[in-house]
Image (tube, coloured by chain):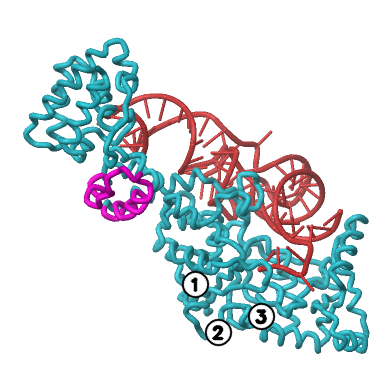
Amino acid sequence: MNVRTRYAPSPTGTPHLANMRVALFDWLLARRNGGAFILRIEDTDQNRLVEGAVDEQIEALTWLGLDWDEGPDKGGPFTPYVQSQRLNLYQDAAQRLLTEDKAYPCFCTAERLDQLRARQTAAKQAPGYDRLCRWLTPADRQQRIAAGEPYVVRFAVPLEGETGFADVIRGEVVVQNSTLDDFVILKSDGYPTYHLASVVDDHHMQISHVIRGEEWIPSAPRHQLLHQALGIGPPFFVHLPLILGPDRRKLGKRHGAAGVLEYRQGGYLPEALINFIALLGWSLDDRTEVIDRSTMLETFTLERLSPNPGIFDPDKLRWMNGEWIRRLDEDDLAQRILPYLVRELPETADEADPVLVRRIVPLIQTRMEVLTDAYPLTAFFFTQEILVTADDLLGKRFRDEPAAAVMALDTAAKALAGLAAWTHTEIEGLMRALTEELGLKPRDFFGLVRMAVTGAAVSPPLFESLEILGREKTLERLARARMVLE
RNA sequence: GGCGCAUUCGUCUAGCGGCCCAGGACACCGCCCUCUCAAGGCGGAGAUCGCGGGUUCGAAUCCCGCAUGCGCUACCA
């Protein structure tokens, strides 16, 4: 079979995790089967359009490496790929249904519909259109249209019987037609609703698999009805389980942490995000967590999609990002860190020299979870002056004998000044010898020097750090710390 | 209210009739390694497989009912 999938966002907001997960599975299915992955813009709601939303979708897909074969920017055999430029197609379809009496014009006003809904809800009845206009005579209809009365086109749902569709993940889903109301397919502004537009386009663009969120299951029977009425075969429906926020509700804007581009800002790797998203509803086996793109491509099947909704766990995403950071080679990591460092360095700091950053990478690779961890871990390399107080320096160990701390600092400074080769092995050898000489525990002595040089009790490995920092700065900082203790 | 979907450790998930008195991962705890912090290694705690009925020699796995959660119920998608 010729597999063709489509990612069809509506440009009404910023792309979030759930969107990208649909796109990922679309992409995987297409690529795995030598098919095509299509990008289509569903801008049929003119009121909710958000400027720049299409660009953001494209940016997110590109960042994640999900490339498409046909789309608004690259064209293709079914151009254009923007629904607002395809209105005649939907209007033709609506017209055909109208002439076949499978649809009808509805002149009911918004006010009437609101009142109707209010009445139904108050009476604890299922809200839905009462089909008032369905029974208008052809003469009535023509007359009101001719008079210029605004109207929508509604689909005439069969009054009896049932409609089912096959969901790839869940199997057959069947509903009674009596529970479906006559839904709008063409709005009064001439634009189609999602239902009509997606059915018409999916058929026209020869889409084989419709992958979308589970929230569409209730609409799928309507789409099935449309397929039948238009005499076209339905595609495979794949309704992905919902992604829930920590409050167990559908993940959305109110959870804040859902914008894909925000994860890029926050120092997440596209590899990690792809990996994480893939595991939201899909699994390779009973133990593999870290999966790269090519493995996914080799192993992805719809059979391993899960039907149950899952809660999004930011902790696990962080962990996974750390896993991916550790898998990067050092040159690569250095390049990825650089822009974040540049972004976060204060004005007064030295520039983020790529050569320096490259040397620092081995010291921090296992200490990062997100790329934005780089700066706090390495700030002392870039800032001109370290701010330490006597309390910081003395800590618990030297609280009661500051003289010992001064002595240790002096000894270290003197010895380091005379060290022949400024390498971390030489530095370490020297410092360890000094430890014995001073009668201190390694952790206390090194901790003191660490605080003096890096300004923190926690830092990357000391001796490697000193090597990279350089003798001059090291001695400067030791001297300065000494002064603080005076 | 109606309709639909789902239901295995706190969370994600493996399991598609016997290998499971349930395996892996995150988080958590302990130990080892160790100049701090990580990473890594080892170990621990954590699930009467939502409940009740069936079917079967045998059920987390199949069927039915109930409960709970969630989704949909717009001229939004």
Numbered disc 3: secondary structure: helix
- What is the C-alpha distance between the residues marked 1 and 2? 17 Å
Q: Report the quarter where the C terminus of chain A lies.
A: top left
Residue holding disc 1? A30
Q: Which chain is mark 2 on?
A: A
Amino acid on which the number 2 mark rests in the picture: Phe
Drawing shade for chain B: red
Amino acid on which the number 1 mark rests in the picture: Ala
Decide which of tag 1 and tag 3 comes sooner along the chain. Answer: 1
Q: Which chain is depicted cyan?
A: A
Whether A341 is among the magenta residues is yes
**Nearest to viewer (mark 1 / mark 2):** 2
Q: Which chain is mark 1 on?
A: A
- What is the C-alpha distance between the residues marked 2 and 3? 12 Å
Q: Which residues are magenta?
A: A331-360
Label disc, if present, on residue A78 of the rendered structure: 2
Nearest the viewer among A345 and A253 is A345
